[in-house]
Image (spheres, grey):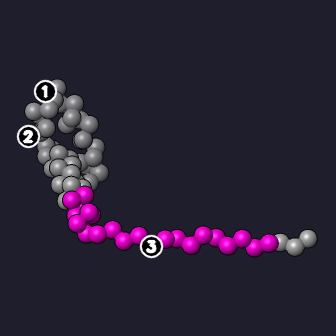
């Protein structure tokens, strides 16, 4: 029996213009800064979202994991 070799399809190089990537990069950067702000704040703006401290307790261990002082 002979084995027939099957050529694998070659990947197509796609170039994405910077003007299409830039808005998404800015959006992800702003979102990352917002997440960092909420994780790093103790109870200031986060208290507006939850009066019972649920958001604070949810983010509490994340603060310690990222070495933010919390107490």
Q: Which mark is in front, 2 or 3?
A: 3
Residue that label 3 marks: 13
- Identify the mark at residue 44; answer none if there is no mark: 2
Asked whether 28 or 9 is in front, the reply is 9
Residue 67 lies in quadrant: bottom left
Q: Earlier in the sequence, mark 1 or mark 3?
A: 3
Say if residue 40 shows up in the picture: no
Disc 2/disc 3 C-alpha distance (Å): 48 Å
Question: Residue 37, percent across and down?
Answer: 15, 50
Secondary-structure class at tag 1: loop
Q: Residue furthest top?
A: 52
Location of residue 21 in the rendering, given as x and y in whole percent from the top left corner: 27, 63
The answer to which of marks 2 and 1 sits earlier in the sequence is 2
Q: Which mark is residue 51?
A: 1
On the question of residue 13 being in view, the answer is: yes
Q: Which residues are magenta?
A: 4-25
Q: Nearer the viewer, residue 9 or 60?
A: 9
Residue 22 rendering spot, x and y as whole percentages? 22, 64
Q: Is residue 19 left or right of residue 6?
A: left
Toward which corner of the image does residue 48 lie, by quadrant?
top left
**Disc 2 secondary structure class:** loop
Report the quarter where the N terminus lies: bottom right
């Amino acid at each position: 029996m002979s084995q027939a070799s099957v050529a694998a399809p070659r990947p197509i190089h796609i170039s994405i213009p910077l003007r299409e990537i830039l808005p998404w990069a800015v959006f992800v950067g702003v979102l990352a800064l917002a997440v960092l702000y909420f994780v790093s704040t103790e109870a200031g703006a986060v208290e507006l979202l939850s009066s019972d401290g649920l958001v604070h307790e949810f983010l509490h261990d994340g603060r310690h994991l990222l070495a933010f002082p919390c107490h």
